[in-house]
Image: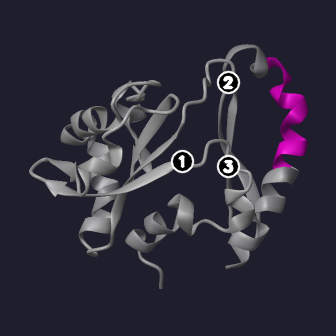
Amino acid sequence: MVNVYEKLQAVEFDKLPKSIQGVYLAPPVISVPIEPDGDGFKLLNPGELDRPAPQALVPKLGIKSWRDSGRLGVIYEGMNMRKMAEKLLKHPTKPQCLAARAWTETKSPLRLHLSPYVDFSEVSEVRFLADQKQCRRISACLRGSSATGLSAALPQLASFAANIAAPFAAA
């Protein structure tokens, strides 16, 4: 039987099926190893990020961003990535710490992932859950002008989600 830690580890970007990686809106462009440090985390090789950000980047501690805290923790273009990452890693959110246990308690490598920033202020989101039997919509977040066309797009979105999730659900 698959345990909760294995399920969490399975949704880290590099563990996802290629079909899902291929449609990822903003895949990580930089991933660096981190480790626990007191109540937070630290970079294993700080020099890897000791340079200006090539573009605005959104960090994720493993599979969780800083969005839970009401801020994304964006590392803006030109900012020193190491300095910003170190500040963020010192103050992980409670959900980040809980999710990170899937890596720390199994002694698996944990990474900080940096993905290109995408402005979602006008983008509605729909989440689907797929298993061997079905692919169903579980939530939606309506934003800006895209919210008015979401109902009409739901059948195509559901079909798209089912198609890309099929190899993942069969695993």
Q: Residues within 10 Å of mark 3 (few under 14, many from 20)?
A: few
Residue type at the position of mark 1: Val
Q: In this picture, is 37 found above or below 84? A: below
Q: Which residue is mark 3?
A: 24
Q: Residue at point 27% right, 49% down?
A: 47
Q: Main secondary structure of the magenta part?
A: helix
Image coords of residue 123 (percent x, y) = 69, 25
Give me the C-alpha separation between circle 2 and circle 3. 19 Å
Q: Residue at point 50% right, 60% down?
A: 12
Q: Residues within 10 Å of mark 1 (few under 14, many from 20)?
A: few
Q: Nearer the viewer, residue 9 or 133?
A: 9
Q: Which element carries disc 3, helix, strand or loop?
A: loop
Q: Residue at point 47% right, 85% down?
A: 1
Q: Nearer the viewer, residue 68 or 30?
A: 30
Give me the C-alpha separation between circle 1 and circle 3. 12 Å
Image coords of residue 160 (percent x, y) = 84, 51
Q: Which residues are magenta?
A: 148-158
On-image quarter of the C terminus: bottom right
Q: Nearer the viewer, mark 2 or mark 3?
A: 3
Q: In this picture, is 150 found above or below 155? A: above
Q: Residues within 10 Å of mark 2 (few under 14, many from 20)?
A: some
150 is within the stretch colored magenta: yes
> Which quadrant of the view contains residue 103?
bottom left
Image coords of residue 39 (percent x, y) = 12, 47
Q: Which residue is mark 1?
A: 29
Q: Which residue is mark 2?
A: 142
Q: Are marks 1 and 3 in contact (CB under 8 Å)?
A: no
Q: Residue at point 25% right, 66% down?
A: 104
Of all residues, the one furthest to the top in this rendering is: 145
Q: Nearer the viewer, mark 1 or mark 3?
A: 1
Residue type at the position of mark 2: Leu
